[in-house]
Amino acid sequence: MRLEPQRHWDESKYCIVEGCISRAKHARRCWKHGGSIECKVVGCRNRAKTKGVCWSHGGGTICSADQCTTVSVSNGVCWAHGGGKRCVTPGCARPAYQRTRNMCSMHFNAGLSSNVSAS
């Protein structure tokens, strides 16, 4: 017997596609079901962030550090000014991602290669 995933009490925040439990982004649909807006620059297929354009064309929030024109990634600042996650390896301040187990690519790849050689 398969149970239906439970949704939060406010149905309007979720994708309207039956069986989908993702949060709605635009037109009450998640990104996977067409709830994103395409960048309005002709020929660009990226998702718009703000002002109808993607990061490459000026969308997104600009870093709050003085004289920085880079797009912020978190807490209002770009990678260079401390935005985003950092590698969990002691002494490493490189950018990290959840998909790489919160490690920078160098430490993640080093861990993969040591696991292969240990096998």
Image (cartoon, helix red, strand yellow):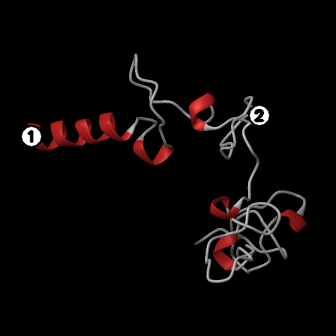
Tell me the element at label 1: helix
Count of picture labels: 2
Q: Which residue lies under the disc numbered 2?
A: 64
Give percent across and percent down for residue 61: 76, 48
**Residue 78 found in image quarter:** top right
Q: Which residue lies under the disc numbered 1?
A: 117
Q: Which residue lies furthest to the top in this view?
A: 91
Give percent across and percent down for residue 42: 68, 82
Left/right placement of residue 54 relative to residue 109 reads: right
Q: Which of 96 and 99 is in front in this view?
A: 96
Disc 1: CA contacts within 10 A as few (<14), some (14-19) or many (>=20): few
Q: On residue 57, which mark appears?
A: none
| 84 w.r.t. 11: above or below | above
Tell me the element at label 2: loop
Left/right placement of residue 10 relative to residue 1 reads: right
Give percent across and percent down for residue 18: 73, 80
The amino acid on which the numbered mark 1 sits, given as a three-letter code, is Ser
Disc 2: CA contacts within 10 A as few (<14), some (14-19) or many (>=20): some
Q: Residue at 18% across / 41% down in the picture?
A: 113
Q: Which of marks 1 and 2 is in front?
A: 2
Rounded to the nearest angstrom, the CA distance separating label 1 from label 2 is 44 Å
Q: Nearer the viewer, residue 42 or 101?
A: 42
**Residue 47 found in image quarter:** bottom right
Locate the N terminus and report the quarter of the image it occupies.
bottom right
The amino acid on which the numbered mark 2 sits, given as a three-letter code, is Ser
| 115 w.r.t. 40: above or below | above
Q: Nearer the viewer, residue 99 or 45?
A: 45
Give percent across and percent down for residue 43: 62, 83
**Residue 41 found in image quarter:** bottom right
Q: Residue at 68% across / 39% down in the picture?
A: 74
